[in-house]
Image: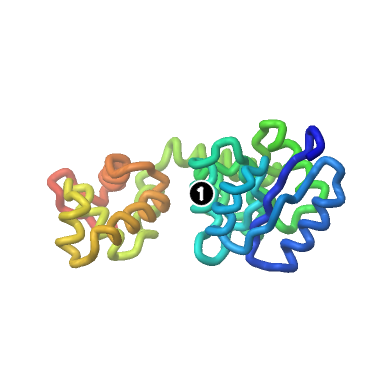
Amino acid sequence: MRAGTIEVLIADDHHLVRQGLAQLLGAEPDIRVVDQAADGEEAVEKARLYRPDIVLLDIHMPRLDGIEATRRITERYPEVSVVILTMYGDEEHLFEAIKAGARGYVLKSAKPEELLQTLRAVHRGEAWLEPALAHKMLEEFRRLSHPTPHELRDEIVYLTPREREMLELLAQGASNHEIAKRLGIAEKTVRNRLSLIFRKLHVNNRTQAALKAREAGFIANDGHEERP
């Protein structure tokens, strides 16, 4: 390995995309592609094996999506940076990727030099978003910092009926075991669904989820639900 070389693992479920990226990056004197992965599980495993400087990761992949793969990689191998390369430029995917630990977010419609600029910036220790995406990110942080009751209710309405039912029970202080018993489902299913609810509501734990539900007026203080 040459000194100063940026080692990159490419993860995308489309073979032609991976090959095209490998050719693009391989032509750069300061970048070396260590391997490729066809899904999120493989990306996490190869991140463990190679410990590359950067994992260039798509969002929608089989077995394990890019958001969860990003979360696992950054938690288990903090020395490895993740850059998302995707076709999705909406706020939800962008916010979830950054929240999961991604250091860069590039659209597949970007020019090759923009991708290369991102990889080099992230390797220098910087976080990198193209200007339009950076603006969206700032607006999303502003909104989440000062959400109106209407915006809070909109987030909860986005939940499925079963997720809202779980949220109600959670806000009433029910444990995972109690929620599973009340709904007739496995406790593991409750844990998985609550994790998804937390992601949708942009919170990190049960307390924050319950608080957001109450602030939105979805759960009354006496424990009875106020439907949106």
For this view, does 18 lie left or right of residue 207?
A: right
Query: How far across and down, in percent of the image, does residue 108 sit?
Result: 71, 58
**Residue situated furthest left in the rendering:** 222
The structure residue drawn at horizontal position 67% and vertical position 33%, both measured from the top left corner, is 126
For this view, does 115 lie left or right of residue 82?
A: right
Residue closest to the eye, 177 or 51: 51
Query: How far across and down, in percent of the image, does residue 152 sit?
Result: 37, 48
Three-letter amino acid code at the position of disc 1: Glu
Describe the colour scheme in one phrase.
rainbow
Visible residue check, residue 135 = no
The structure residue drawn at horizontal position 20% and vertical position 60%, both measured from the top left corner, is 180
Q: Quadrant of the C terminus?
A: bottom left
Decide: is 185 above or below 226: below
Instruction: Give the labeled residue for mark 1.
Output: 96
Query: How far across and down, in percent of the image, does residue 92 sit?
Result: 52, 53
Visible residue check, residue 179 = yes
Number of numbered tags placed on the structure image: 1
The structure residue drawn at horizontal position 39% and vertical position 59%, both measured from the top left corner, is 158
Decide: is 121 above or below 155: above
The structure residue drawn at horizontal position 31% and vertical position 45%, both measured from the top left corner, is 209
Decide: is 63 above or below 139: below
Kindly indicate the quadrant of the structure image that contains residue 181.
Answer: bottom left
For this view, does 127 lie left or right of residue 65?
A: right
